[in-house]
Amino acid sequence: MLNSLLLCSLAQLPEPTFGDGIVMSIAEVRARPTSGDEWKNLLSWASRFEPVDMSNPDSHGDVVALAKAMVGVRLRDRAMLGDARDMILAGIGTEAGALEALAPARNLPPVIVAWYDLLLKAPVSYPVVSIEQYRRFKAWVEYMIDETTIWDNRSLVSTFLRRPNNWGTNAGFALIAARVALRREQEIVEHAKVFYGWVGNRSMYDDFDFDGNQWHPDPKDRRPINPVDSYIPDRVGHAFRPMDGGLPDELRRDVSYDNDTEEEPFYWPPPEQNYCWGSMQGAVMQAIVLGRLGYDVWRWESRALKRASDWLHTYPDRDPYDNDPPGYPADGDDEQIPHVLNKFYANVLEVPYPVETPASPMKNFIGLDWLY
């Protein structure tokens, strides 16, 4: 079922071109090496056991299951593939304990990708998934992305449509993964419009609920990623500060300067706000999926994802009085993002973004440093 909010846009995008895999194909996984730090890290995560839990936004069970599926396909290890399958099936129903939509938004995509990209197509002598298991999982995915499936008054659909921050981008990844798996072509087209709106094309979609104006260059033209060549005047230094690529709905959440309010006034240098990279996790994963469907997402809105990464690498500064240069590179569970950006922006980056090898898993995926 399509949400009526999605149908209000008159702008058009082409229908998707389905390839092999939501995020990866069997051939791509089989072509990757079984050596190196990235492989060892993936193998280490695949050796763990942590239950798949749709109620806990900080659970790692979903990425463990995906790691098992990736390693199982690469090594043709049927036992590991079976473990991944059983972990995923055991997670069905755990969403009932979720207090908010963020938990399923983060935890659903890895199991969808593991199931549809890998377990259903695994290169082993007989199927890993039975017909009954296939039907059960498909029905659950359909339930999870339905507009009437709600956590704290929000479904994954409403979260994607309304929230311009990391909640929305992570819900978007969950939805697009499911929509590709289920081959819902019209929903994919409308989804692509919303993502085009998120990177800045308001003619495609413009119905986000923003909080505050302080980090928006133009309060009458609010966007999730600030537009090209945009600036905000610094009320203290009376200078115009570059905000091209800034993520205003995440930056306004900084509370380091005033514990009495969540909505901070604009100040410079900007904060090292981890929520920005949280938004990028969901956005980059949506871009991977939409790109595989034939959409030129990496170029949309003057390479908006690159502009956002450039801003984060250049301006935030936790302590402007120390001797460290400004800039806030991805770290921790955001370390996989630069590996992806370096691949898709290789032709336009003068210097690649700094990377950590091996990279820690994200909240919603694992193994991108190995894949890319």
Image (tube, rainbow, N blue to C red):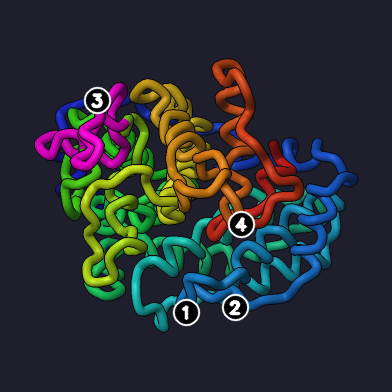
Distance of mark 4 from mark 1, alpha carbons? 30 Å
Task: Name the residue tied to disc 3.
Answer: 12
Q: Quadrant of residue 104?
A: bottom left
Q: Quadrant of residue 247?
A: top left
Residue 133: % across, % down: 59, 68
Distance of mark 3 from mark 2, alpha carbons? 40 Å
Q: Quadrant of the C terminus?
A: top right
Q: Residues within 10 Å of mark 1 (few under 14, many from 20)?
A: few
From the viewer's perspective, tell me whether residue 290 is left or right of residue 151: right
Task: Name the residue tied to disc 2.
Answer: 90
- Residues drawn in magenta: 217-241
Q: Quadrant of residue 363?
A: bottom right
* Callout 3 amino acid: Gln
**What is the number of the mark on residue 93?**
1
Q: Say which element carries label 4.
A: helix
> Is residue 308 placed above or below 162 in the rendered structure?
above
Residue 247: in magenta span: no
